[in-house]
Image (cartoon, rainbow, N blue to C red):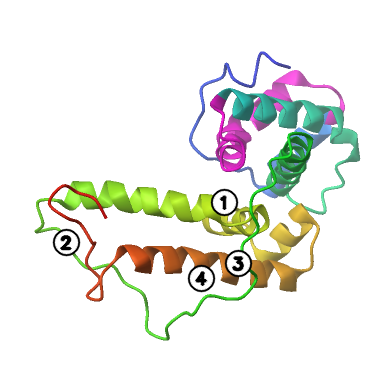
């Protein structure tokens, strides 16, 4: 099993239609390694990308990702198909990340559950294509967004990543992390409000990045 995860080339995102997925699951239940290799090829990059959000050490992220697929292969007989295979893999990854955090006492600092103030007007970034410091601003904004993601609680970050980056719907996320749909929606709101608050702090009143001549902000 370990020959797959970590040694296969991470391919572009790909998902199977329901008929192909059901056929692959049936073969995996019969210990068909080639069939499960197709599952690994299709989802390894997505699972690793998700795990990286919660495990900062790259080697550990690869280990967790490998463990996800090992557990999935071992537990394939218990996969009932009520959720998509993708959601099921994310659920395994989610639980493993939580277990690691608990064992190492790395629980992220909880973000206040009081919603940040969000304006009624659409939030847009100013067009700075004319600005010679565009690349610098873009790089800094990426760091701002990364910092915003890292400073929110794991509960909020999980929902934001699954919804906005992995394109899971509310019900899929609810099944993945075992919470009500309403909880998913409220956490997503709070996560987005937190990111927006961090970005607003980075921009000035006119929507321009606060950059001094040396590039600090």
Could you tell me which residue is drawn at 10 percent across and 57 percent down? 131
Question: Are there few (<14), some (14-19), or many (20+) residues within 10 Å of tag 4?
Answer: some
Residue 92, image x, y percentages: 76, 40
Residue bearing mark 2: 128
Answer with mark 4 or mark 1, whichever residue precedes in sequence.
Answer: 1
Q: Which residue is mark 4?
A: 193
Q: Residue at x 90, y 39 (%)?
A: 78
The quarter of the image holding the C terminus is: bottom left
Residue 208 placement (x, y as % from top left): 22, 67
Q: Which residues, given as a range, are shown in magenta?
A: 29-58
Q: Quadrant of residue 172?
A: bottom right
Magenta region includes residue 44: yes
Give neighbour class at mark 3: few <14, some 14-19, many 20+ (Cα, 10 Å): many
- Give the residue number, with chain letter if any, for mark 3: 188
- Which residue corresponds to the image point at 24% horizontal and 62% vertical from the top-left? 209
Q: Earlier in the sequence, mark 4 or mark 3?
A: 3
Disc 1: which residue: 166
Task: Give the distance between the C-alpha atoms of the residues marked 4 and 2, in whole angstroms.
Answer: 24 Å
Which is more N-terminal, label 2 or label 3?
2
- Left or right of 21: which side holds 122? left
Query: Sequence order check: which comes first, mark 3 or mark 1?
Result: 1
Question: Please, what secondary structure does the residue beneath circle 1 have?
Answer: loop
Of tags 4 and 2, which is closer to the observer?
Answer: 4
């Amino acid at each position: 099993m370990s020959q797959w995860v970590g040694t296969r080339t991470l391919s572009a995102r790909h998902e199977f239609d329901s008929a192909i997925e059901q056929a692959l699951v049936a073969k995996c239940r019969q210990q068909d390694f080639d069939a499960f290799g197709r599952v690994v090829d299709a989802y390894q990059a997505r699972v690793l990308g998700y795990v990286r959000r919660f495990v900062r050490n790259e080697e550990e992220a690869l280990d967790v990702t490998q463990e996800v697929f090992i557990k999935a292969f071992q537990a394939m007989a218990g996969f009932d198909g009520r959720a998509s295979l993708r959601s099921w893999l994310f659920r395994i990854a989610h639980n493993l990340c939580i277990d690691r955090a608990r064992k190492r006492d790395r629980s992220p600092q909880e973000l206040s559950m009081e919603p940040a103030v969000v304006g009624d007007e659409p939030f847009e970034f100013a067009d700075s294509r004319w600005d010679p410091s565009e690349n610098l601003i873009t790089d800094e904004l990426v760091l701002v967004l990364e910092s915003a993601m890292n400073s929110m609680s794991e509960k909020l970050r999980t929902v934001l990543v699954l919804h906005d980056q992995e394109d899971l719907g509310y019900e899929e996320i609810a099944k993945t992390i075992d919470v009500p749909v309403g909880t998913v929606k409220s956490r997503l709101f709070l996560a987005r409000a937190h990111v927006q608050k961090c970005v607003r702090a980075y921009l000035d009143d006119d929507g321009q990045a606060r950059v001094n001549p040396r590039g600090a902000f």
